[in-house]
Structure formats: C-alpha cells, structure tokens
C-alpha cells in the first residue's frame, strides 16, 4: 500500500500527517505531528521571517525528515501558506530548508489554500450548506458551499491570529486596540461581496484558533483530534466573553488554549465573531481537517483522472 506524508507549514505551526492509501483509493491517517514554531512572529514591520523563527521551523522539519527516513516514507508533499507567502525572504528560507532537510516545499496561493480547505471540509463534515472559516496564524479563508460544492470563489484575507495580534495587541488588549482591530476585521469582511447574502447557515470552522475554541468548549486538554464538534451561537458568545475578560496568564490555564495560544487567541477569534454576526449563523462546527487532507484528496482525484 502506498504511504504518503503531507506537511503544512503555517504561520504558527507545522503539521505533518502520515497517510496510508488503500487499493480502492480510500485513505487512513496513521500518525499526526504538530510543532508550534511561530514562524510569522515579529515579521509585521518589515515582512521578513526572523532568524529565530526560521531556526525553529528548520529544527522541526529536520525532526520530521528523520521520522520519515525511519519509516521509509519517501513520498512527501509539503506546502507553505501565509507566512512564507508574504515574507520578502521566503524564497531564501525555503532554499535553506531544502539544503538542510531535503524537503521541497511549495508556496500555495491563498485561493488554493481555500480550495483545499473546501475539499477537506466537504469530505469530512457531511453537511451540505455552510461557510468555511479557516483562521490561521497569518490569514483567514472564507468559502461558501451549497450541496457540498463551492458556491462562490474562495477568498483569502491577510489577517490571522498572529498577524492581528502583532498589528493591534502587542501593547495589550486595550479598548482602543480592540476597537481598531474590530473595525479592521469588519472592513475586510464587508468587502466580500457575497458574504452578507448568505444567511443563517452554519460556519464550518478549521484552523488552530477554532480548534482551540472547540477544545475550550469541550473542557478538553488532550491532543485528541476535534471531530465535528458543534458550538451554538450563544456558547460562542459566552466563551468569547470569558476569553476577553481573562488575562493571557489566566488563559494559559484554560483547557484547549494553554501557553501556546494564550496571547493570540482573542485576536484570532475576532474574524469568527464578525462573520457570525454578519451572516446570523446559528452554530459553529469544528473539525481537525484542513490543507493536509485537501492536498491528499486533490492528489487522489488527479491520480484517478489519469487512470
């Protein structure tokens, strides 16, 4: 049976999933790995990846390559998203990754990232109509789908949990900073022409920020993947208010948030809150899928088409 490794190099974390492809073209995830490397940390001012962040990423990728060598997995598909996409020194960084790890990483466009998200969500959630919201570290993607198919062009906006934090909250979550950030997010959302026309549908949530929200809602501090966890609109409001009122230190004790996201979770939830209000969404459905599963499904679709 074919084995394949898929790596997603994001703005906050690197995630690697190992899959076994069955003869009937179905697949099974055999292992998953995640490293919080904060690749986009400190790049807001000059749009360059900082040396310390690059070293964290390369160290994690070396560890991943060693795992793949031990398991004799040579089929590796690796992509980078918003942080590398926006970085002035992204090309040089990926060249260093290739030299030090042997892994070739492709930078994908925001629209491609959104399309892959749609593939993954429509395959895993089993819902017909929704708006996908993928809040990453450096960007947020929105896709509307109906009857399991994309209804509108995918939209990628350069605002995520870490980028919003660095733009507005590095000096603290003051009332003025919150007002400015909310205005910024609302402006970007109201510029999406089709968004306000799609009302009363669930939000299909993916990405680290929304997985953390789901874990917090579940009071789950484990590393168990989130599988189609539903959170009502009222529950979202309550959780957001608790997170807003708590200091980062206090949030670090919250299940699902911890030290990894205590500083950026509030900023990361702002796009969700504005989207929920704009479309009057009744609930959020969170699943631990995304670009990796989308890449695999895309690969399987293309391989079947060639047969």
Image (cartoon, rainbow, N blue to C red):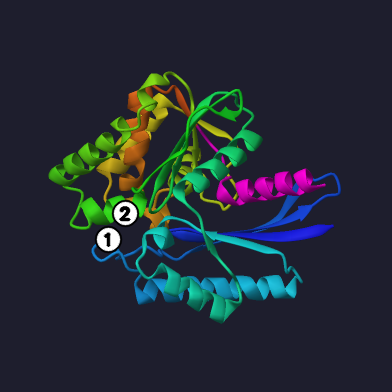
Number of other residues with Cα within 10 Å of mark 1, as a class: few under 14, some 14 to 19, many 20 or more: some
Above or below: residue 287 compared with residue 161: above
Which residue is pictured at 36% across the width and 49% down the height? 160
- Across and down, in percent, residue 78 comes to 59, 62
- Over which residues does the magenta segment extend? 285-307
Q: Is disc 1 in contact with disc 2, using a CB cutoff of under 8 Å?
A: yes
Q: Nearer the viewer, residue 3 or 254?
A: 3
Q: Is residue 288 above or below residue 241?
A: below
Question: What is the C-alpha distance between the residues marked 1 and 2?
Answer: 7 Å
Q: Residue at x 44, y 18 (%)?
A: 200
Residue of label 1: 44
In the image as oriented, which residue stretches furthest toward the front? 306
Q: Is residue 171 left or right of residue 132?
A: left
Side (left or right) of 115 relative to 302: left
On the image, the x and y values in percent for residue 215 come to 49, 43
Residue 116 lies, in percent from the top left, at: 57, 44
- Picture layout, residue 296 above or below residue 146: below
Q: Is residue 255 visible?
A: no
Q: Is residue 221 magenta?
A: no
Q: Which residue in the protein does label 2 denote?
A: 163
Examine the image and state in which quarter residue 197 appears: top left
Q: Is there any visible trace of residue 74 in the rendered image?
A: yes
Tag 2, which secondary structure? helix
Q: Residue farthest to the left?
A: 176
């Amino acid at each position: 049976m074919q084995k394949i490794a898929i790596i997603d190099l994001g703005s906050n974390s690197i995630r690697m999933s190992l899959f076994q492809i069955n003869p009937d073209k179905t697949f099974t995830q055999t292992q998953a790995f995640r490293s919080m490397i904060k690749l986009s940390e400190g790049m807001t001012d000059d749009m360059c990846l900082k040396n310390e962040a690059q070293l964290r990423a390369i160290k994690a990728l070396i560890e991943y390559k060693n795992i793949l060598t031990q398991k004799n997995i040579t089929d590796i598909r690796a992509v980078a998203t918003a942080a590398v996409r926006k970085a002035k020194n992204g090309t040089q960084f990926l060249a260093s990754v290739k030299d030090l790890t042997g892994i070739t990483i492709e930078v994908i466009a925001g629209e491609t990232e959104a399309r892959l998200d749609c593939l993954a969500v429509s395959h895993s959630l089993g819902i017909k109509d929704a708006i996908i919201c993928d809040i990453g570290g450096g960007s947020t993607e929105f896709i509307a789908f109906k009857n399991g198919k994309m209804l509108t062009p995918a939209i990628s906006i350069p605002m995520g949990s870490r980028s919003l934090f660095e733009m507005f909250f590095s000096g603290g979550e003051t009332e003025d900073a919150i007002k400015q950030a909310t205005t910024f997010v609302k402006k970007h959302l109201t510029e999406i022409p089709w968004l306000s026309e799609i009302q009363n549908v669930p939000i299909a949530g993916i990405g680290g920020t929304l997985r953390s929200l789901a874990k917090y809602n579940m009071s789950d501090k484990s590393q168990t993947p989130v599988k189609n966890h539903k959170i009502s609109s009222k529950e979202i409001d309550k959780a957001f208010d608790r997170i807003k009122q708590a200091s980062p230190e206090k949030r670090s004790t919250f299940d699902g948030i911890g030290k990894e996201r205590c500083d950026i979770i509030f900023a990361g939830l702002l796009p969700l809150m504005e989207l929920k209000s704009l479309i009057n969404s009744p609930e959020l459905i969170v699943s631990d899928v995304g670009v990796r599963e989308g890449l695999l499904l895309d690969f399987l679709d293309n391989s079947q088409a060639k047969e």
